[in-house]
Image (cartoon, rainbow, N blue to C red):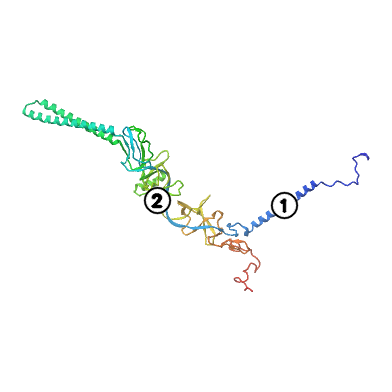
Amino acid sequence: MRPDSPETTDPATPAPAPSRLAWASRRAWWIAGVLVLLLAVALAWRIHRLGQPGDMPFGRGGGGGALPVAIAQATTADVPVSLNALGTVTPLATVSVRPQVTGPITRIAFAEGQAVRAGELLAQIDERPYQATLDQVLAQLKRDQALLANARLDLERYRKLLSQGSVAEQQVATQQATVSQDEALVAADAANVESARLNVGYCRVTSPVAGVAGLRQVDVGNLVQANSSAAIVVVTQMRPMSVVFTLPEDTARGVLAKFRAGGGLPVEAWDRAQSQRIAVGHLASLDNQIDTTTGTLKLRALFDNGHAELFPNQFVNVRVLADTLRQQVVVPGAAVLGGSAGSFVFVVNKDHTVSQRAITVGVTAGEMMSVVDGLKAGETVVIDGADQLRDGADVRLPGEAPAADAGGKGGWGKGKGKANGEGRRRPAGPPGAGGPPPGGPGGPPRA
């Protein structure tokens, strides 16, 4: 390159200073590195502190503290064995009252929703045509009765004349036939009278059962037809009321044995949410065969229904008291937990620790659950707070106040988790180190 080239630079000329952007970039990387280093130090310190016995989580048996729990005692009680099913309220009688004669309605004698008695008047159909027919057949009956009486008198006269030889025997036989014909006419007239009277009675539409009348289907002045499909009103029997429900065939065997032995089986009807008992009754009857499509047996329970608690076609939950187990060990259902190995409970020991114990559960009755094996009456179990416990964990019972440990950390009552207690011992040291404090048992007197 030539000395006089414009690209030639003077060695004495200083190099340009770095830009502000490059300096800010290096400063940001330096700050980020410091923050990462501080975070790593904090994480390492936290891991180290968690490894210390004093910083173990509550209730884990590490001595950091005891977990407060709620407890209950296992007791003995009689446990009812109930079978649950879904039932339908079914009236014993639901009658659609239909007209049996043709004619206009002249009177409606009931109010919708009214309780009616058996035989009480519901509606009146115009009876005048039927009364006229009745009068006509009555007159016919009287005329034929008179003819019959006259024929019988003639027969008696012919018999006297026959004994005297004044008439032929054929004439007596003919008169006897006339009497028989008149007797048949009188009998037919009597049947016509009964039929006419029955039609007149059908003009009074009465309730066949005691129950509650529904909504009326006709009004005054409507013409109703005999044996029509349209009903005047539907009357439903309300007392007693039945509930029809089904049980699986395997479950129904015990019920069948009790029912056939004459033992009364109480039945309870509960609402849809099973929170309120509606009525109490008894098992009344059962079907004579098992439904092959569902494998269930249909049963009927009767309820007095004195206050109309049960309403027709209402769905209810049915509980049948099939048996009663005597003197069973029971605990609240909240105490029973489930795991891969089965059901278990946490039993509270005398030193305020818990032991996880496997149990065999039986029948559930409300909020209580029977225990077949694994628990004795009088033992104390945890019913609240067990989700954070494990075998050997320390617990604080209700009514116990928290206590502070020697290191200033909060402890909970007695147990292995108490500071310097059974569950957290100081490491061995030189003679005299870790001994009792001054003034304590075996130590020098306080100054």
Quarter placement of the C terminus = bottom right
Q: Where is residue 129 in the image (x, y as percent from the top left)?
A: 28, 32
Q: Where is residue 323 in the image (x, y as percent from the top left)?
A: 40, 50
Crowding at mark 2 (Cα within 10 Å: few <14, some 14-19, many 20+): some
Crowding at mark 1 (Cα within 10 Å: few <14, some 14-19, many 20+): few
Between tags 1 and 2, which lies in front?
A: 1
Q: Name the residue under label 1.
A: 35
Is residue 30 shown above or below 220?
Answer: below
Q: Say what amino acid the circle numbered 1 marks.
A: Leu
Tell which of 285 and 376 is nearer to you: 285
Left or right of residue 67, residue 101 in this image: left
Q: Where is residue 254 in the image (x, y as percent from the top left)?
A: 39, 47
Tell which of 77 and 281 is nearer to you: 281
* Label pair 1/2, CB-CB below 8 angstroms: no
Q: Name the residue under label 2.
A: 323
Place residue 4 in its image quadrant: top right
Q: Earlier in the sequence, mark 1 or mark 2?
A: 1
Q: What element carries label 2?
A: strand
Q: Position of residue 84 (x, y in %)?
A: 43, 47
Tell which of 236 and 446 is nearer to you: 236
Tell which of 360 and 18 is nearer to you: 18
Q: Is mark 1 on a helix, strand or loop?
A: helix
Is residue 371 shown above or below 8?
Answer: below
Left or right of residue 372, residue 427 in this image: right
Query: How many numbered discs, if any?
Result: 2
